[in-house]
Image: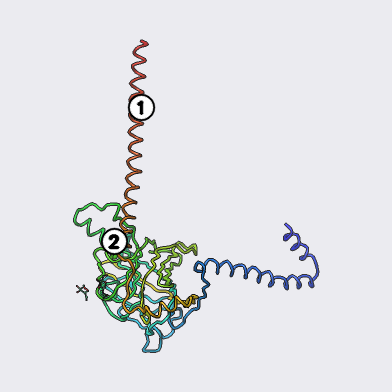
Amino acid sequence: MAAVNSSKLSRSKSQLNVMSRWNIMPYKLHLIFTFLLLFVSLCFSDDDHEMEEFLKREFSLSKPYQGVGSLGSSHWELMGDAMVTTDQVRLTPDMQSRQGAVWSRIPCHLKDWEMQVHFKVHGQGKKNLNGDGLAIWYTKERMQKGPVFGNMDNFTGLGVFVDTYPNEEKYIEAQKKRYTPRTQRIFPFVIAMVGNGTISYDHERDGRPTELGGCNAMVRNQKHDTFLFIRYIRRRLTVMIDIDGQHEWRDCLDIPGVRLPLGYYFGASAITGDLSDNHDIISLKLYQLTVLRSKKEEEEEEQDVVTIPSVDNMELLRLSQNEEGMSGLAIFFTVLFSMLGCIFLIVIGMVVYSHWNESRRKRFY
Ligand SMILES: *[C@@H]1O[C@H](CO)[C@@H](O)[C@H](O)[C@H]1NC(C)=O
Ligand SMILES: *[C@@H]1O[C@H](CO)[C@@H](O)[C@H](O)[C@H]1NC(C)=O
Ligand SMILES: [Ca+2]
């Protein structure tokens, strides 16, 4: 109320007053800004540790993609069917049997980082008549063609896949087997995988045997922007998505004990088969995260240098994922059977009541 009154007042007063109002504005703005910053930093801070982030241009790819794809003059190199336009790096067009990639030329030696991926998957195909998806990489190898979303199999490092086609579901359906709720997934589905050079990605099963975790993500043919965040702090891998146009991050997976060596390459790749889509990268932004470490932590990391990617307690991880699936199934059946039970009791009750009613009427007549 007071604010409205004062603004009316100032409008009726002299130029000088208006001037002084303008002098106050920046101060207010400043206050608001400080609060916003505080709020944002609170939201983004990693538990009890302070954290700062710096955009690293040499590991980032954004408009106008200066020099990308031309010889040697950029930090990024194109491969296969990938093409640069004014608005995006198109990894594949919406055509069959294409594959393309964009790879950083510089190995990354940052310990803690976050990759923010602005991407777009779109095409003419109807739902589930599109494919196959795109991948974001942090690997030892670069510029290799192959079956894993346009990259080589048995890769060494981290892959985060936006899988847009349910191969396993179609495969099981083709064998005329029933697809059970436990295994049912809604596609597109995002998963993460860590390879050590000898682990194969199982394309027919959408990578389930080797996945660290995942989530569904309706990213296809969206009018708003879609983002993927891959954060790696203190050997903890977190993947988040922002795909609803609400500028909110949604957790996708969060796994501690992910050991990734330094000096690997960032990249993005995509593939189409019989089914296709445009797979576009609009930007890749890499932030260095400066995480305060205690002396002890630093010493431990120096003694325990990672040379081969691995994930601690991978067996436990897989077990807990299966249990999660089972308990979901258990809940489903519990609810189903209790509902059936209720309906059964109600029907019995109605039958008994109507019999009792009839026999009572018969007694009267
Ligand atoms: C890679 O991982 C597999 C499965 O965890 C393991 O059997 C194999 O020994 C690992 N290879 C290397 C080189 O560490
Ligand atoms: C990947 O590794 C598996 C098992 O180690 C092996 O059977 C397969 O031939 C390898 N594939 C490629 C393309 O190297
Ligand atoms: Ca798939």
Q: Residue furthest bottom?
A: 72
| Residue 93 image offset from top left, x and y in percent | 33, 73
Residue carrying label 2 = 166
Location of residue 243 (image quadrant): bottom left
Q: Amino acid at mark 2?
A: Pro
The numbered disc on residue 254 is none
Whether residue 117 sits left or right of residue 125 in the image: it is: right
| Residue 72 image offset from top left, x and y in percent | 37, 89
Nearer to me, 266 or 8: 266
**Residue at 26% across, 58% down:** 169
Residue carrying label 1 = 350
Mark 2: which secondary structure? Answer: loop
Location of residue 120 (image quadrant): bottom left
Whether residue 23 is visible to the viewer of this picture, yes or no, is yes
| Residue 122 image offset from top left, x and y in percent | 37, 67
Q: Amino acid at mark 1?
A: Met
For marks 2 and 1, the one nearer the N-term is 2
| Residue 63 image offset from top left, x and y in percent | 46, 79
* 279 up-or-down from 108: above or below: above
Separation of residues labelled 2 and 1 (CA atoms): 46 Å
Q: Residue furthest top?
A: 365
Mark 1: which secondary structure? Answer: helix
Nearer to me, 244 or 340: 340
Nearer to me, 53 or 308: 308
Q: Is mark 2 within 8 Å of ligand 3?
A: yes
Nearer to me, 335 or 47: 47
